[in-house]
Each structure stands twice: as structure tokens, then as C-alpha cells.
Amino acid sequence: MSTDTSFFAQVNRQFDLAAPHTGLPAGLLEQIKACNAVYHFAFPLRRDDGTIEVIHAWRAEHSQHKNPTKGGIRYSMMVNEDEVMALAALMTYKCAVVDVPFGGAKGGIKIDRSKYSAGELERITRRYTYELWQKNFIGPGIDVPAPDYGTGEQEMSWIVDTYRSLSPTIDAEACVTGKPIHMGGIRGRAEATGRGVYFGIREACDNPDDMRKLGLSVGLAGKRVVVQGLGKVGYWAARYLAEGGAVITGLAEYEGAIHNPDGLDLEAVVRHRKETGSILHFPGATNLPDSAAGLELECDILVPAALEQVITETNAARIRAKIIGEGANGPITPEGHAIIKDRGALIIPDTYLNAGGVTVSYFEWLKNLSHVRFGRMDRRFEEATTRRIADAIQRVSGGNLTDTQYGDLVRGADERALVDSGLEDTMITAYREIVDVRDRHGIDMRTAAFVSAITKVGRIYQGAGIFP
Ligand code: GLU
């Protein structure tokens, strides 16, 4: 196998493994694979001390088979053209896998955000937005950014505010997702990716055939989990997995990893890190020298939820987990994947497993375009209907329902509950679809996710006659 370390080349090698199973013509496959547009730009930042610094930034739009294109913006020193193209491509496949009607995009600014003041970060973000706007690389129907590594609600607020001042249209709020609630955000977006990771892993553990092959019991309860990365994805994934009955036995961050076979109290570790600046030396846990060592811990489920390319041909043979759930984008290289697959482990691929973020972004975008909160029109109506049913049950059962039971029964779904239900349904449906493709073609989950995505994108191109 090629040892090209280009991230985009690696994504395309995964694409090439899947392509023959789709039956699509070679030329069309080339079009689906190509990154349609990449914009690299530089702009000056006046720093707080008066000096001027040149900032390099990118936005890649991989596929316009559906509009808008969609994908996060990351702030990291690792950002470059190859990385944004690879991540934009992954967004195309990810959206297709979970039937979210967007093309893929990704953006990035090459900065170490810890070296800038809040004022400087605001100036960088607003200027980045302006540059995208000027070149038609942002807009509710064009390209809709979101948070990614190193960005969050604050940056999304600056983006929507800048965009709205440039294009004060009725739908301007839908130009970006991952916003705070008061700026048009949606309840449940911040935890969505981690929540989706949980739903996906739970679904995998509920598959009796797969668990038998792995020598594991059915269900999440009692499974030992190691998570790399305690950020937006890893923290929530760990939390929901623990709430679902799994035991967090290892955690890894930049500074190292910790292990306790009896289980780690996630909230206590987070508190410890806040107080000491590190997860290391957590009471009752063993320290491991670095984050990579955490990946090699003995466990049932490993969730790499930090950065890409952390499992390669050099360490794959030492990964002992039976299930690997890719919380991050592209954490396993194709060479690493082959080694782990040969050992018989189950890899739940990123193109499916971390799609919860963009799924709830889709709900946020819909909310912005419809200008109404989910549940606003029907919640009380639903409550009134169930109240009539509950009252009838009370009468028949002689008033046996407790106040709590009665309250639970009549509660109408609010925005958070509806988002959660939409996310759960999306993750379950897509998992079953991938398993079906996998079993029909006799391929692994990653290839199956690609086959499913490429087939869906291809159908749209073919329906459109490819060149209108
Ligand atoms: N950055 C997230 C991802 O990689 C979310 C993208 C989005 O919501 O548009 O999936």
C-alpha cells in the first residue's frame, strides 16, 4: 500500500477501495472524489502591541452535489491546504451517510489560539468572515461553517454578526451553525457530536452477531472504554457512554494518559485537570507517559476523539481494543486500518460515528430558515391531547398514577427532546444501512460507509444529468 502521508490522498485511498462496489462509471467517480474549490487567503492582523502579523486561512468546498456546502472551521497550527481538502471530503461523505442534505466543506486558520487575546481572535474571525463573504464562500444557501477543533460558540457569534452586517437578509442567521441559543443556536448542538458517538457505539454493541465475533457480551453495560481527547467530542462521548453503563477506564490528553481498571470518575478528572492543569496524578489512577500510550491500553472500546492520523502503521499493532469508535475525523490511516482489521477488531468509522454534530447543525439551519423553535407550535397541543388520555387512564385505573407518572405521561416534547430524538433516529438508521451494505458486499464498516455515501452522491449527479 502507498505510504503517501497526504491526508487527502489517504481519504481518497479509502474512496478507491469502496468505488468498485458502487458500479458507478470511472469519470463520475473522479468527479465525486475531486475537491471542487479551495480558497487560500492571507490577511494582516494588527496585534495588541501594534505589530502586524500575516494570518493564513483556507476554505475548501469539496462537493456541490447538494447546497449549501457544510463543515467546520478549525484554528490550529496544523491547518494547511491538504488538511482542509481532506476534511471537506470527509464532510461530503459524512453528510451523505446520515442523509443530511449538504455538500462537504471545511475551513481553517493557521494559528495557535492560546497565543492571541480575545480581541485579536475576534478581529481574526471577523476578517476571515469578511474575506469568505467577499468571495461568495459563505451564505445560508452557499456554504455554512460550524465549530471544529479550536473554535466554538464565541467564534460562531462573531461570524453571524459579521455576515449579518454585510448581508442583512431575513435568512442571514442560517449562514453558520453552532451558535449560542440567543444568536439563533439550537439546544443540544454543543453535545451533539459526542451524543452521536454514544448512539453509534451503543448500536454497535447491540448487534448480537458482531459482539459474538468479538467475544463480547451484547450491550454497552460494563464495557471498558478509553477515550483520547476531553474536548467537545471526547468529553460528551465519555459522559454519555458512562451514563449508558460503560466504564471509563482510561483517558488521554496532550499531557499524557491515566488508567484505572476499576473506572475513572469523569467529572472528578475534569475538576482535577482544571485545578492542576493536567489529568496526570489523578488519585487512584496510573500515569502513562504520553497521549499515544493511552491508545494502547487494554480495553473493549477505544474512542480516539482528538486529532487525525493518531493510529498509523507504527502503532496499530499495539492497539488492543476490540471496538474502535472514531470520534475524531480521520484518526486512523489506511495502513493502520488494515492492521487493526486483520486482527478482527470492529472499526466504527468517522464518516458515520461523528456525524452527530453536522446532523444537529442541519436541525439548527432548518430552525433558522423556518424562524421558529422546534416544538413551539405543537408542544402544548400534544400535552393537551396526552392529558385527555392520561385523565381517562386515571378514571379507569381509579387514580393509581402518581404525580410523577402523570407528569411524565403528559409532557410534550420541547426543542431539546426533539433534537435528541432526531439525532438518535439518524444514528440508528444510518448504522443499520451501513451494516446492510457491509454484509451484502462482504466489506468492512469504513468501506461500507464510503459505498453508501458515494452511491447516494452519484445518484444525485446522475439524476442531474451531471452537467446541466
Ligand atoms: N466540525 C464538525 C464536523 O467535523 C461539524 C460540522 C458542521 O456542523 O457543519 O463534523
Image: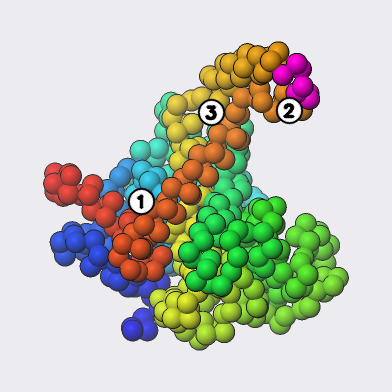
In this rendering, the label closer to the viewer, 2 or 3: 2
Residue matched to label 3: 374
In three-dimensional space, the C-alpha distance between marks 3 and 1, rounded to whole angstroms, equals 24 Å
- In front here: 93 or 70? 93
Q: Is 398 rendered above or below residue 286?
A: above
Give the residue type at disc 1. Ala
N-terminal of the pair, mark 2 or mark 3, is 3
- In front here: 176 or 316? 316
Q: Residues within 10 Å of mark 2 (few under 14, many from 20)?
A: few
Give the residue type at disc 3. Phe
**Magenta highlight: main SS:** loop
Give the image location of residue 445, x and y in percent.
Answer: 41, 65
In three-dimensional space, the C-alpha distance between marks 2 and 1, rounded to whole angstroms, equals 40 Å
Q: Is residue 328 left or right of residue 175?
A: right
Q: Is 206 rendered above or below residue 345?
A: above
What is the magenta range? Answer: 397-403
N-terminal of the pair, mark 3 or mark 1, is 1
Q: Is 158 rendered above or below residue 313?
A: above
Does the beta carbon of the residue at mark 1 sit less than 8 Å from ligand 1?
A: no
Position of the N terminus by quadrant = bottom left
Residue at (60, 28) in percent of width and height? 413
In the image, farthest residue toward the right:
283
Residue matched to label 1: 96
Residue matched to label 2: 405
Give the image location of residue 4, x and y in percent.
Answer: 36, 81
Scheme by which the image is coloured: rainbow
Query: Is the C-beta separation of discs 3 and 1 under 8 Å?
Result: no
N-terminal of the pair, mark 2 or mark 1, is 1
Tag 1 secondary structure? helix
Position of the C terminus by quadrant = top left
Give the image location of residue 186, x and y in percent.
Answer: 57, 36
Tag 2 secondary structure? helix
